[in-house]
Image: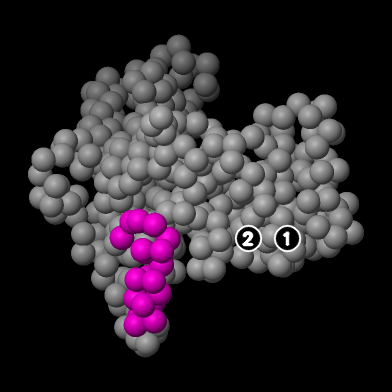
Amino acid sequence: MDKKLKIRARYLTKEYDMMKTKSDKLKSLMPFGNTNIEKFWALKGVSFDIYEGDSVGIVGLNGGGKSTLLNIVSQIIPPTSGELEVNGTTNIISVGAGLNGKLSGRENIIMKCEMLGMSPAEIDEKMDDIINFAGDQVIKKIDQPVKTYSSGMKSRLGFSVLVHQDPDILIIDEALSVGDAPFFEKGVARMKAFKEQGKTIMFVSHSLSQVKTLCDKVVWIDHGRVVMEGTAAEVLPQFEEFQRTYNKKSKAERAKITRDSGQNFSLEELHEEHPDDPISYFQKKLYDKPFSWPTQGVLGFLTLLLIFTIVATLKEVPLRTAVLHPLYIIPASWLLVIVAVIVVIAGIGILTRHRKERHVLD
């Protein structure tokens, strides 16, 4: 029996704007945008297929694009280009993700469970199991603010909440890396139980021993590209050898490699490498869509009203008189000029807007 396809990724990319100063951020809000902002490509054409029951490890160096990829697959952020198909519900677990530091651990459990669609009765039923699974340290501080928790306690609490849900696809981003040995063993047991139920798992960790324990397939990503894909036995030895060589380089050399790799890329080059695939894979998606025409009309009217009010105030004309005799405040010729300027600015803004979603990488 063929396995059901759960995740299909084709040439996923992610471009960030590297806003180095506050003025860069301000300029980016202007109608004409800021075309001189430095770009960084975190993903550069990632493709893979994951099937029902697969347990897939994502390995790579720091800054390689692993977390960006998981956030795209879990649909927290959209890709710049490419195609993603996800068949099923996803839950992502990362260190302290979605926890409110001002709330207690118990209150955070209620909040996260409600966000995941659980009813008050279901939350009450699972509350003790969630707390007990998180471990003794969390149990002792469950009614204290989460901001007083260590990173390991936050991770265990978040992990415990999400593994007591019933997602089709479980995405784990370093959530077991800060836990102790007993908690890791409980986490592994729960992951194996999910896998036996036919659930799909994507797992990111810098601990290759954890990847070996949990995953039967591995995708190696380096600087936004898939280097190798295969079984854990095939991929991990190759990655370990690469990691040893890379770690011998100086900090400056490694930083330069990362910086250059994020800039020396274009969608045109990616398409040239894969000319037989649909061109739609290599076109930027427009997520920051312009305002609808009704919204633009309302904004235009409010702008004119503001100008009218300011002029009436400056001329010391009562508002009632200004409303009854508007042409006394603003001559028809000036009114036409103002409307024309607004239309021109709006038109240029539409024509020059970047066909992409703007994400900022500080």
Amino acid type of the residue that numbered disc 2 sits on in the rendered structure: Leu
Q: Identify the element where label 1 is drawn.
A: helix
For residue 181, side relative to residue 315 (left or right): right
Residue interval drawn in magenta: 228-246
Let me know if residue 20 is in the magenta part: no
Residue hosting label 2: 176
* Residue occupying image coordinates x 25% and y 34%: 350
Q: Position of residue 20 (x, y in %)?
A: 39, 66
Front-lying residue, 323 or 150: 150
Q: Position of residue 91 (x, y in %)?
A: 57, 41
Amino acid type of the residue that numbered disc 1 sits on in the rendered structure: Phe
Q: Which mark is residue 183?
A: 1
Residue 124 against residue 226 in the figure, above or below = above
For residue 327, side relative to residue 71 (left or right): left
* Residue occupying image coordinates x 35% and y 56%: 230
* Residue occupying image coordinates x 49% and y 49%: 55
For residue 97, side relative to residue 223 (left or right): right
Let me know if residue 243 is in the magenta part: yes
| Contact, mark 2 vs mark 1 (Cβ under 8 Å) | yes
Residue 9 image-quadrant placement: top left
Q: Identify the element where label 2 is drawn.
A: loop
* Residue occupying image coordinates x 85% and y 60%: 136
Q: Report if residue 271 is visible in the image.
A: yes
First along the sequence among labels 2 and 1: 2
Q: CA distance from mark 2 to mark 1?
A: 8 Å
